Amino acid sequence: MRQNIKKVHKHYFFMKRGQVSIDLLITLIIVVMVIGAFTILLSSFKSGQEEFFLRTQLRENSSTLASFITSTNAISDTNFTTKLMIHNINYKNISKQPLVSINQNYIKLAFETENGLIEEEAFFSNPKDSKVTTNGRLLVVSNE
Amino acid sequence: MNKGQIFSLDFIIAMILMVFFLGLLLSLGELQGYERKEKRILYELESKTEAALISLVNSPQFSCKLDTNSFLAYSFDIKKIDLITNEDLKNSIGLLDYNLSLFLDGTQVTGHEDIHSGKNIYAIDVNILYCNGEVSFTELNNCMSGSCGDTINKQTLKLKVSK
């Protein structure tokens, strides 16, 4: 018992008062590394989620617009002009109108991000002799 | 702690628990993402099918024509449908890349019978006026008062769409 007490005293005998032990230093370095790794992991997860959310919005909006255009087939035996508002896209606390392009039977919505342009498209079928255009925030389908 | 020992058992246990809970958190996030993806697919399928149905039963391309040169809303001309392939029909009603089957009163419409197994399916039933070619106004009137003939009849159209 007395010998053990002596040993303990001997171990701390070499450390000066206020000195930081190598054990503590290594632990701190490991903790900082682990926190750093978790932060990188979480931020990449968050950024992945943000892009997924953006793609979902673009896809849903393009699908809604395509369904709207397809539905105009029902009134194609009359002279018509129909309009639908293009909704804004929310991305990282920014709410902005997407870029809209119409190519034959596809409507494409695009949104500019720091990683480049994110695009989603949807197929539609519009009546013969009708035109699909955009006018500001409005999507216009007309055969007049 | 022994001399030269780097990690204490407490620290190792704390790290294991931390990694375990982080993994749990990430897998929960993945699960939520998967659920959202499923919802999005279903929403897309629903809206596409509804738009296709409106086009199919109201568009002059497929609906019944009266001898007065007008088209009947919520009608379905089997003669027009027989003349068109399933691919062309899907193109016309905005269902490209989807599978489509049509049923009239539970009986499959020949030529419009895609396979849906192993896919997300959405189906809508709608009451329509079925006709076989052009219909006269008198025939329509008779059908509305209860005596429908072979050329015009009340039926249920089922639109089955999958992707």
Image (spheres, grey):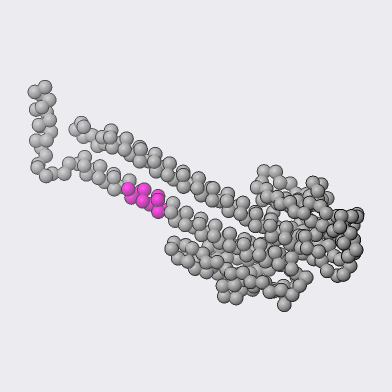
Q: Position of residue B52 (x, y in %)?
A: 71, 59
Q: Position of residue A96 (x, y in %)?
A: 49, 68
- Residue B125 visible in the shown view: yes
Per the rendered image, the range of residues in magenta is: A35-44
Q: Based on the picture, tell me whether residue A37 belongs to the magenta stretch.
A: yes
| Depth order, front residue of B36/B147 | B147
- Residue B96 visible in the shown view: no
| Depth order, front residue of B130/A116 | B130
Q: Which SS type dominates the magenta stretch?
A: helix
Q: For the N terminus of chain B, which image quadrant?
A: top left
Classify residue B22 by image quadrant.
Answer: top left
Residue in the image at 78% along x and 70% along y? A77
Residue in the image at 68% along x and 68% along y? A104
Classify residue A43 by image quadrant.
Answer: bottom left
Count of residue discs: 0
Q: Position of residue B11 (x, y in %)?
A: 28, 37
Q: Position of residue A12 (x, y in %)?
A: 11, 35
Q: Is B17 placed above or below A84 here?
A: above
